Image: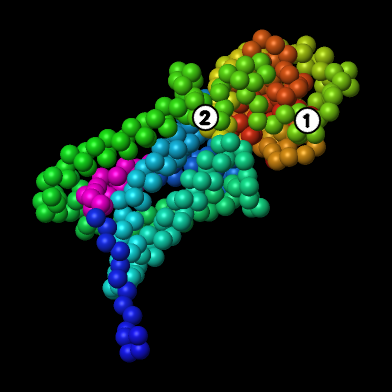
Amino acid sequence: MEGMRSRFFPPVFKGRLHDARTATSIGRWLGLAFAVCFCTGLISHFMQHPPGWLAGELPSRPVWGYRFTQGLHVASGIAAIPLLLAKLWTVYPRLFEWPPVRSVRHALERVSVAVLVAAALFELATGLLNTAQWYPWPFSFVEVHYAVAWLLIGALVLHIAVKAPEIAAHWSRRSAGTLSLPAEDAPDRRSLLAAVAAAVGAVTITTVGQSFTPLKDLTLLAPRHPDHGPEGLPVNRTAAAAGVGLIHPERYRLTISGPRPYTLTLDELRALPQHEVELPIACVEGWSKSAHWTGVRVVDLLERAGAPVHARVRVVSLQTRGGYRVSEMGHEHARDPLTLLALRLNGEELSPDHGYPVRLIAPNRPGVLQTKWVGRLEVLS
């Protein structure tokens, strides 16, 4: 074998539909799913972790706002999974192109694709596991998921810019670039696209009922059913998981700080004017459900404490471990007449897992910020 020079022979793919037209058809729907997921994800992140300039100005209306955007975020992310798999199937033969780099433009394209695919797989996988509250990794999900989302969108924009001529050439059936494709591939392409659409529809229909309750009886694949839980409402963190022991009603005290601080016993809270509202609990994992809440309006407690009109409020829980022990509200939420310190849920006294004896419920607010086991309200300047 001496003197012979080895040569690389790339594999030959005889399967059809690994073409630009099919990739473009699937890619435009995948791009739309990513765009919707990214925009709604930004809303969710800013609602949970608002920057300083926005912290006091988050809107409390519409009351269903966070429920809609977060439900759409999770639904579009789940729909993107079969779309991404189909897209990768149409283009994977290009991984074996030879030579691997033909020009600067081609190198830029390959780098953008590598980053795009890695970021997309990471975002969809971690997001899906988050809906089931399973975190088999050592890093903080929220911060890393948010950072990689920006990386994904940047890589996607770069990829679209590099591939723009090819995308335009195969965007529609009448595009010039599609005329050279074999006519016999058209029926198979339609069948493939119909199968992908059916897969997207199937995973959406069987999961979206966790937030779109008219379809709740079809939630075969969703990790949560909106009706399953104490008092007909799901629970993410139980009292035991939060380190909240038995709270004796005669020993409970609610402290309200401010220009005129005061303390209330549970009986005194119950004796105050009670208000009823119907508001949803909307969790970042994607499930949500409306419920009837009865309690004391936060704005009434703040006025008694002499709180300034535009003051923010810190809500402190009695829980001893776990995240979100403390949350803050801007004046929009604090002064909204629908924001309550709730004592009852669906006509019954709060169960321990739902925050007995007192929990916060406010409109257009992430579920993780609807603080349970409230022990203190602090007026912030």
Outermost residue toward the right in this view: 251
Measuring from the top left, give residue 350's x and y in whole percent.
72, 17
Say which quadrant the C terminus sits in. Answer: top right
| 25, 264: nearer the viewer | 25
Say which quadrant the N terminus sits in. Answer: bottom left
Q: In the visual, does 190 lie left or right of 271?
A: left
| 169, 256: nearer the viewer | 169
Residue tagged 1: 240
Residue tagged 2: 222
Is residue 29 magenta-colored? yes
Q: Are marks 1 and 2 in contact (CB under 8 Å)?
A: no
Q: Quadrant of residue 344?
A: top right
The residue depicted at 17 percent of the width and 45 percent of the height is 185
Question: Relative to 161, does residue 32 appear above or below in the rendering?
Answer: above
| 61, 354: nearer the viewer | 354
Magenta stretch, residue numbers? 15-33
Q: In the visual, does 373 lie left or right of 105?
A: right
The answer to whether residue 315 is visible is yes
Give the main secondary structure of the magenta stretch.
helix
